[in-house]
Amino acid sequence: MAAAARGCGGVWRRAWQRGAGGPAPAPRGQRAVACNARGGAVPEGKSGLAPWVPVVGLEIHAQISSNSKLFSGSQVQFAAPPNSLVSFFDASLPGTLPAGYQITQQRVPIAVNGSLSYSLCIDNKMSQMVTKTVRIKQIQLEQDSGKSLHDDTRSQTLVDLNRAGVGLMEVVMEPDMCCGEEAAAAVRELQLILQTLGSSQAVMAEGQLRVDANVSVHHPGEPYGVRTEVKNINSIRFLAKAVDYEIQRQIEELENGGTILNETRAFDSKLGCTVPMRDKEGKQDYRFMPEPNLPPLILYDAKSLPANLNHQQVVNIDWIHERLPDLPSVKRAKLVEQYGILPEHSFTLLNEDGLTEFFENVVKQTQMKPKKVIGWILKDLLSYLKQHSLTVKESPVSSFLLADLLNLLEKKEISSTAAKQVLAELWKGEEKTPLEIVKEKKLELIQDQKELEQICQAVIDGQENEVMAIKAGNRKVLNKLIGLVQRETQGRSNPVLVKQLLEKKLSQ
């Protein structure tokens, strides 16, 4: 595939001016990206500069859906008062067999050697998508740590242990990605999978899904460069920006004769750049040791399950697999097959929480074909929701009301222009039905054909130049006359009927 993927790819080339200092916070116009959809190298450009190959690997921490912490009975609750959900064990108090350290499966992970397929658009066109795969090195369970709250005004750091001991799932991805867009698409797909399975609510705004991005750059054919780690990114949009900025920063640093430090950095969302946190030059000794109080966690499949064990007290992977819901990729395929919608529309439906259910509910309640329904949902309803920063569940227009409105349109009781007016009224949340709004605003289609003929004739009489152009063979001008009739009737005329009447009169 020769098309270029927007904002990412296998090779980056410097196309900005060298400056005395580091790069500015990543304005898009300052960076040029050369790539192909497969992430491979492309030929050298006119600049004569050697291309750069970015390498991106991710570590994703997902909070496990659970009412209590991993090894204590403390509740798991977002936005609770600081240190209000802390047991003696969580606080490592003396006399409680304190841990005082993080418990993790780092050496014996629960799963290894997996993969995740994800899709991203080419040239920012939803109609052109490419599927890529990132390898998953391992998935492990571990405890979350406490949270430090830095008070710069008082020059002090406070500690909140509400999060300490909460169960996490760490997904370690191999360095198979090459830009922020790919990283963001992979994390979004993983987020959808976790939410579908119920393994994690994965709400990034609540800290239930956090990403560490490892970034390096090198020339083709050379060993990987020194990597930096951008920690605790809590937004998919910020992840894309952080990765792209860090790639740009490293290229600029190297081309200015500098070196890249093996360090931990943070992404400052206000400035749009990464900032240093601590270096990793000294080898870190985490002093891993077996936890004596925990027995091994053994997983079975149908073949390895011993006959003498109580099946309700063991983990049988095959039993779980048989009961899994459809994953996002399967859901998308079914949406396309069942409703005849475009593949890119299926991505939008799944990416917006609750939008698939909303769409299917509308389809069940309306006579309109799904291909037309999807347009109203993606173009009209979704634009209203984004404009007012609302989720699908917060929409003042229910699936029932939208279906009711589309039925009026499908039965040709109102025009599409009038339907949009009704939708705007429904958005006000005044508990009126579409039909009540239509009657109140007098938006019904004009059924009297003689009245429509008189309006059409009046429009023709007032547009001599347009009439001459149409009779000379310029049929496109007819659309202007249709629009003028629509304006005269305030959207209450059927465009198809109006076109027929105009054509009839112009042919006489």
Image: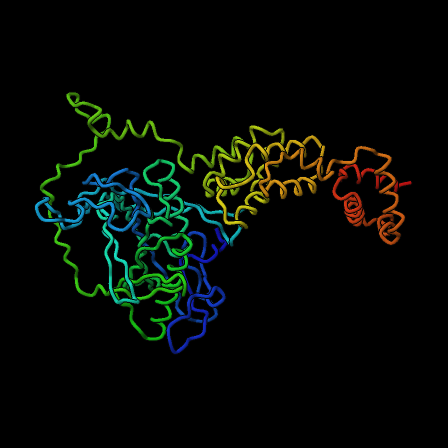
- Res 215 → quadrant: bottom left
In the rendered image, the quadrant that contains the C terminus is: top right
111, 235: nearer the viewer = 235
Task: State whether residue 282 is above or below residue 392.
Answer: below
Instruction: Work out whether residue 297 can be spotted.
Output: yes
Residue 88: percent from the left, percent from the top? 15, 45
Task: State whether residue 23 is above or below residue 90.
Answer: below
Residue at the image position 64 percent from the left and 35 percent from the top:
434
Residue 381: percent from the left, percent from the top? 57, 43
Furthest toward the top, the residue is 308
Total marks placed = 0
Residue 378: percent from the left, percent from the top? 56, 43
Residue at the image position 36 percent from the left and 60 percent from the top:
54
Residue at the image position 88 percent from the left and 45 percent from the top:
458
- Res 270 → quadrant: bottom left
Residue 52: percent from the left, percent from the top? 38, 64
Residue at the image position 39 percent from the left and 63 percent from the top:
245
Image coloring type: rainbow
Q: Is 90 situated left or right of 195 in this image?
A: left
Instruction: Work out whether residue 223 can be spotted.
Output: no
Task: State whether residue 418 is above or below residue 314.
Answer: below
345, 495: nearer the viewer = 495
Furthest toward the right, the residue is 508
419, 43: nearer the viewer = 419
